[in-house]
Image: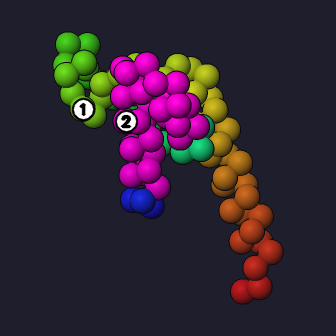
Amino acid sequence: LFLVYGLAFIGAWVGQIGALLQSEGAVRVGMWTRLLLPVEALWRRAASLLTPPLPLPVSPFTGGSAPGEAMVLYALAYAIVALGLAAWAFERRDL
């Protein structure tokens, strides 16, 4: 579980650095990471809502732009599908 979050964290950093350096490839890596592992995008959204606006640009954990409502809805759908697939796989197991 920590490995998955670590990959999401690193992918988000690659995307942010790519946006800063105007590297299209790095921005794509960040975008695909957010789509495959939306946990980091949700963290950034929560941090942007809970943190006062002043420290946001200087903090390494909350910097960058906050994901929009569409990303939150995508993450919710992602979680529902993942839980559904897990329940389906568990149902097929012979206990």
Mark identifier at residue 21: none
Q: Quadrant of residue 90?
A: bottom right
Under tag 1, what secondary structure? loop
Disc 2 residue type (three-letter): Trp
Per the image, the residue denoted by label 1 is 60
> Mark 2 — residue?
13
In this view, the residue in front, 93 or 41, is: 41
Residue closer to the observer: 58 or 27: 27
The residue under the point 52% across, 37% down is: 29
Tell which of 79 and 67 is nearer to you: 67
**Helix, strand or loop under label 2:** helix
Density class for disc 1 (Cα within 10 Å; few <14, some 14-19, many ≥20) is few
Estimate the x, y position of residue 6 in percent, counting from the top left: 39, 52
Q: Quadrant of the N terminus?
A: bottom left
Q: Are marks 2 and 1 in contact (CB under 8 Å)?
A: no
* Residue 20 screen position, x and y as percent: 36, 20
Left or right relative to 93: residue 51: left
> What residue lies at 76% left-to-right and 79% top-to-bottom?
93
The quarter of the displayed image where residue 70 is located: top right
Q: Which residues are magenta?
A: 4-33
Mark 2 and mark 1 lie on one chain; the one further toward the N terminus is 2
Does residue 82 sit above or below 61 in this rendering? below
Q: Position of residue 50 (x, y in %)?
A: 31, 24
Q: Position of residue 65 (x, y in %)?
A: 40, 19
For the stretch drawn in magenta, what is the main secondary structure? helix
Q: Is residue 54 visible?
A: yes
Disc 2 versus disc 1: nearer the observer:
2
